[in-house]
Image (cartoon, rainbow, N blue to C red):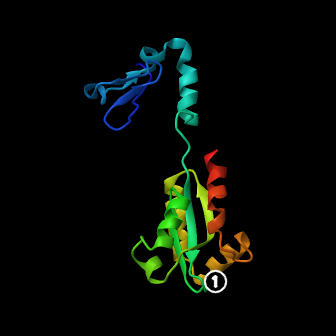
């Protein structure tokens, strides 16, 4: 029995060492590692897949915005904090945030995985206002509007 990986990227399979895409008719087949990289590189290839070094890190943010009077809180998730806050500021996002004029960032949390970010967003949305206020106060004690610091926030996670 041959050890192998079935690497999926859309409808094609990527062969790392060969640096080529395999044809779609070979997708369902498990490709033996030895065939891809040779006997001596099996451990190295396994290490790469376990650590996921071949993937570019992603940035996702759970954020809370409010109106000018800080009387309403809106929780959301995005992969670009600057774009999303700009959309809220310009009134491009229909619904609750536009209706209540929520456009001031007061809280954010970074996640490398979208599933974790969505789970955290759902968790925060179930909380009562008092618990959300405690979260915001721990992160941003003066409840200052963070809109002007967004470029530096994203720069930290993009470098």
Residue 145, quarter of picture: bottom right
Residue that appears at 57% across and 22% down: 43
Determine the residue located farthest toward the left in the rendered image. 25
Where is residue 54 shown, x and y percent of the image? 53, 33
Horizontal relation, residue 43 to residue 90: left or right: right
Q: Residue at 44% x, 82% y: name it.
A: 99
Residue depicted at x 50% and y 54%: 114
97 w.r.t. 157: above or below = below
Q: Residue 13 vs residue 89: left or right?
A: left
In what element is the residue under mark 1?
Answer: helix
Residue 124 on image: x %, y % = 56, 72
Q: Is residue 101 left or right of residue 136?
A: left
* Residue 142 placement (x, y as % from top left): 74, 77
Please rate how many residues cluster around mark 1, counting C-alpha atoms within 10 Å: few if below 14, some from 14 to 19, many from 20.
few
Q: Is residue 82 above or below residue 75?
A: above
Q: Nearer the viewer, residue 31 or 155?
A: 155
- Residue 143 versus residue 21 in the image, above or below: below
Residue nearest the viewer, comparing 57 with 31? 57
Q: Quadrant of residue 19?
A: top left
The quadrant in which the C terminus is found is: top right
Residue marked by disc 1: 130
Residue 9: x percent and y percent? 38, 36
The quarter of the rendered structure image containing the N terminus is: top left
Q: In this view, which residue lies farthest toward the top? A: 39
**Is 67 left, or right, of 141 in this rendering?**
left
């Amino acid at each position: 029995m041959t050890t192998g990986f079935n690497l999926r990227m859309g409808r094609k399979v990527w062969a790392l060492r060969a640096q080529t895409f395999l044809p779609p008719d070979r997708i369902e087949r498990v490709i033996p590692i030895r065939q891809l990289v040779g006997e001596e590189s099996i451990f190295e290839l396994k290490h790469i897949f376990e650590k996921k070094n071949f993937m570019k890190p992603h940035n996702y943010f759970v954020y809370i915005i409010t109106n000018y009077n800080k009387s309403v809180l809106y929780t959301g998730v995005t992969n670009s904090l600057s774009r999303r806050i700009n959309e809220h500021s310009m009134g491009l996002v229909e619904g609750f945030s536009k209706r209540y004029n929520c456009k001031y960032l007061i809280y954010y949390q970074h996640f490398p995985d979208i599933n974790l970010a969505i789970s955290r967003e759902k968790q925060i949305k179930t909380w009562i206002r008092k618990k959300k206020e405690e979260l915001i106060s721990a992160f941003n004690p003066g409840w200052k509007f963070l809109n002007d610091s967004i470029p530096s926030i994203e720069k930290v996670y993009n470098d």
